[in-house]
């Protein structure tokens, strides 16, 4: 009989061979239930009852008594959706299957939700529809009834604890019908359980057309809300992936308010909270929010932390916040956690990150004595300050008003605490007054003989074309005498041909460089180009003729130096392409970062030694005049290196992972990240026998990336009394790893890991007299 009722609820999912007999039997059973209000069932065993009650107690223990009914229902709904897998075999249909086995059909979802909600003090009932062959729930909030369908809010497919819909959460009948709930035979059944099955119903009531309050129908949680949510003592904070916005709902039956808008395509967002405080992670940043206030950015991942990925989720661990850092699992894919960091919640709520951003980064053009005001957005502590790097060209006031002085280019920088941003301002004016001067009686410059031909223009420039000399090192002179006239040298792509033998090319100060061509094209000889001293001729062409394109298909080109160049007058800036040996780039002083082209996808990660340890995803994020070097290749798997009394072994070269294999010294810190020859590695393991019989070791810190500790790792470290475990992701501690460690040892571990770590440490030989806290 239980099987047949499940078929009623699940509809056309399962068909019997004898269809007519099945339909008659199902109808008879349903009528029997309606007429007698009883569903006889086989009693559950004592073991299954205990398992069921334990599961119920565990779920209800996670509920805060101070929560509103909406918050409690949010919690129960999300718990079931994220912990139950829909049963595609249609053979599990009870509340027991839902809460103990975590797999069931709609009847199991509805029965479990009904029991949990009623035990939480919220009137609830199962709802069934013979027309739909489906079951869900009705709940009473603020003296009005609404519908909740956990089954239809649980997308089928692989389980993902983040993936949860709220399309069918606290909806009116009309709201449910927009999500394809049909039929006019909706009934509520108030039931009792013995965990395995329904054993009695109090009554059955037709409710079609009755539950029509639409208070919650237009809530933003009905559009692709993800979990977890922050359930506070005064509201709900949740992320709506439909519009990439985090909302706060005060449980006052009014529309939610926007808290944070997440930037980027498929951003990594997570929400957690306690009491009146919510914390929100968005990609590499964390915000603190108290309902009714404004969200403040309180944390940004450091450069080392970014090496492990982005913040995939945050949660509460005792008095701390836990940041999981790694690769975010989009859609149904689960996160890959590579690192865990903890910070005190009180400390985190009081932190502030200073920010400032110029709204429009495009180059501004003004005339002398004219002004433009730079618009910005800023937040956090700090005082805004403004600066011009060339006050002879333009000055800037304390409010960001830039006033032109004379023709030229300058960079305007705004600072807020440690944050800063900048843009380029060009003061237009003046004309090119250059012209050739007489050089009567002087011979043509000898260096011109190295070119196939030259030509001049009316503005007094000479253009050498097609270098044919044999010099490996060539510096372009700033001037040349030609036919008894002295000209300024101008240079464009036709200067260099495929056959040119120059290896190192430089420019004297004042050489005019005309954009519009690829300067070095299809050349096997060139190794370095030093543009320093050159002057970019502004507005020398139109359309593609104003592009500054450096090189294409030069396999031996290793260095490009553009320090001091002013590229503000060109319409585009294109870096070397198909130049596989390129190792070093020095950025220009002024360039339009919003209109730059980085053609080669292999050239997007650079380390900047001049400005400290910085990684750029794109070159146009790099500072002016910065010296950038291509990130070096990692060592091969199995290679070793030693730093600060610890020897490391490369365990995964592709993913930059190492294990600490030998530990010496008295006070040792196993860091999260270790750097060797410019390459950063995550320390993910402590190897077998790493510190075995190290009788001088007294203090040990285990970094946040460690996942395993090998056999005998700290065997007979008899003086080791202080152990600080920063990692929240240790999954295995092998035999005798802590055997013989001092019985006076105090081991400090993350709060959310205390129970599991304590068990692993004891199994690995840690003295029962040692303290794990």
Image: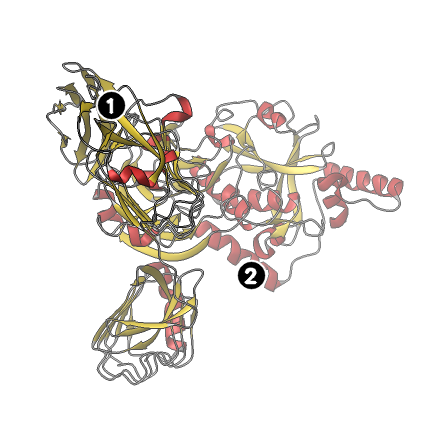
Whether residue 438 sits left or right of residue 513 in the image: it is: left
Quarter of the image for residue 678 reads: bottom left
Q: Residues within 10 Å of mark 1 (few under 14, many from 20)?
A: some
| Dot 1: element | loop
Badge 2 density bin: few <14, some 14–19, many ≥20, Cα 10 Å: few
* Residue 621 spot, x, y in % from top left: 31, 39
Q: Quadrant of residue 190?
A: top right
Looking at the picture, how far across and down is residue 630, in whole percent? 35, 52
The image's colour scheme reads secondary structure
| Rendered location of residue 389, percent (x, y) | 14, 32
- Would you name the residue on which mark 1 appears? 460
Q: What residue is rendered at 62% in x and 46% in y? A: 157
Secondary structure, mark 2, is helix
Look at 40% across and 27% down and name the residue there: 256
Nearest to N terminus: mark 1 or mark 2: 2
Task: Look at mark 2 in the image and give the residue it sits on.
Answer: 50
Is 741 rendered above or below residue 281?
below
Q: Nearer the viewer, residue 189 or 58?
A: 58
Is disc 1 in contact with disc 2, using a CB cutoff of under 8 Å?
A: no
Q: Position of residue 37 (x, y in %)?
A: 70, 40
Height in image: 615 above or below 550? below
Q: Does the image show residue 485?
A: yes
Q: Is residue 255 visible?
A: no
Q: CA distance from mark 1 to mark 2?
A: 97 Å
Q: Which mark is residue 748?
A: none
Please tell me which residue is depicted at 84% across the width and 46% down the height of the picture: 16
């Amino acid at each position: 009989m239980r099987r047949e009722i499940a078929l009623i609820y699940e509809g056309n999912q399962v068909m019997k061979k004898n269809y007519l007999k099945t339909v008659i039997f199902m109808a008879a059973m349903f009528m029997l239930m309606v007429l007698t209000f009883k569903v006889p069932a086989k009693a559950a065993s004592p073991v299954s009852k205990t398992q069921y009650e334990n599961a119920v107690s565990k779920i209800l223990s996670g509920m805060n008594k101070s929560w509103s009914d909406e918050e409690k229902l949010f919690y129960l709904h999300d718990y079931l959706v994220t912990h139950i897998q829909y049963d595609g075999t249609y053979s599990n249909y009870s509340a027991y299957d839902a809460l103990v086995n975590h797999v069931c059909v709609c009847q199991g979802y509805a029965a479990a939700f009904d029991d949990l909600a009623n035990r939480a003090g919220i009137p609830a009932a199962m709802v069934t529809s013979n027309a739909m062959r489906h079951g869900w729930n009705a709940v009473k909030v603020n003296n009005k009834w609404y519908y909740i369908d956990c089954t239809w809010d649980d997308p089928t497919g692989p389980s993902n604890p983040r993936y949860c819909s709220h399309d069918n959460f606290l909806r009116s009948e009309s709201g449910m019908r927009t999500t394809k709930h049909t039929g006019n035979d909706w009934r509520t059944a108030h039931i009792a359980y013995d965990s395995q099955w329904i054993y009695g119903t109090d009554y059955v009531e037709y409710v079609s057309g009755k539950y029509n309050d639409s208070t919650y129908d237009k809530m933003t949680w009905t559009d692709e809300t993800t979990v977890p949510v922050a359930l506070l003592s005064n509201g709900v904070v949740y992320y709506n992936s439909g519009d990439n916005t985090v909302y706060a709902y005060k449980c006052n039956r009014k529309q939610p308010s926007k808290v944070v808008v997440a930037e980027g395509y498929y951003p990594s967002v997570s929400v957690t909270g306690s009491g009146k405080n919510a914390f929100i992670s968005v990609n590499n940043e964390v915000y603190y929010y108290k309902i009714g206030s404004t969200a403040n950015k309180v944390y940004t991942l450091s450069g080392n932390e970014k090496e492990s990925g982005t913040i995939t989720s945050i949660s509460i661990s005792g008095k701390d916040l836990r940041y999981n850092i790694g690769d975010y699992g989009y859609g149904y894919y689960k996160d890959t956690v590579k690192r865990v960091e903890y910070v005190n919640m009180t400390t985190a709520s009081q932190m502030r990150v200073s920010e400032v951003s110029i709204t429009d980064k495009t180059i501004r053009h003004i005339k002398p004595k004219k002004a433009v005001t730079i618009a910005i957005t800023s937040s956090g502590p700090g005082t805004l300050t403004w600066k011009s790097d060339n006050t002879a060209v333009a000055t800037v006031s304390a409010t960001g008003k830039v006033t032109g002085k004379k023709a030229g280019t300058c960079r305007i920088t705004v600072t807020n605490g440690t944050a800063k941003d900048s843009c380029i301002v060009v003061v237009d004016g003046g004309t090119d007054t250059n012209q050739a001067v007489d050089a009567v009686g002087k011979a043509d410059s000898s260096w011109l003989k190295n070119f196939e031909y030259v030509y001049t223009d009316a503005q007094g420039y000479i253009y050498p074309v097609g270098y044919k000399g044999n010099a490996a090192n060539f510096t372009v002179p700033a001037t040349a005498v030609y036919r008894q006239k002295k000209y300024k040298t101008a240079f464009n792509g036709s200067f260099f041909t495929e056959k040119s033998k120059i290896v190192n090319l430089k420019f004297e100060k004042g050489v005019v460089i005309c954009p519009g061509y690829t300067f070095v094209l299809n050349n096997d000889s060139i190794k370095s180009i030093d543009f320093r001293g050159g002057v970019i001729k502004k507005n020398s062409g139109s359309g593609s003729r104003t592009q500054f394109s450096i090189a294409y298909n030069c396999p031996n080109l290793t260095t490009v130096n553009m320090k001091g160049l002013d590229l503000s007058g060109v319409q585009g800036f294109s870096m070397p392409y198909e130049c596989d040996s390129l190792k070093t780039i020095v950025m220009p002083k002024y360039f339009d970062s919003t209109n730059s082209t980085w053609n080669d996808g292999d050239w997007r990660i650079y380390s900047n030694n001049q400005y400290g340890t910085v990684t750029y995803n794109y070159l146009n994020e790099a500072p002016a005049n910065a010296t950038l070097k291509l990130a070096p290749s990692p060592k091969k798997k199995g290679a070793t290196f030693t730093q600060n009394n610890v020897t490391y072994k490369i365990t995964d070269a592709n993913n930059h992972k190492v294990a600490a294999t030998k530990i010496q010294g008295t006070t040792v810190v196993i860091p999260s990240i270790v750097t060797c020859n410019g390459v950063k590695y995550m320390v993910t393991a402590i190897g077998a026998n790493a510190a075995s019989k190290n009788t001088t070791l007294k203090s040990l810190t285990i970094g946040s990336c460690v996942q395993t500790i090998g056999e005998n790792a700290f065997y007979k470290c008899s003086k080791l009394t202080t152990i600080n475990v920063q990692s929240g992701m240790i999954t295995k501690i092998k035999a005798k790893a802590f055997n013989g460690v001092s019985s006076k040892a105090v081991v400090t571990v993350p709060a959310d890991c205390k129970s599991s770590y304590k068990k692993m440490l004891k199994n690995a030989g840690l003295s029962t007299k040692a303290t794990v806290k």
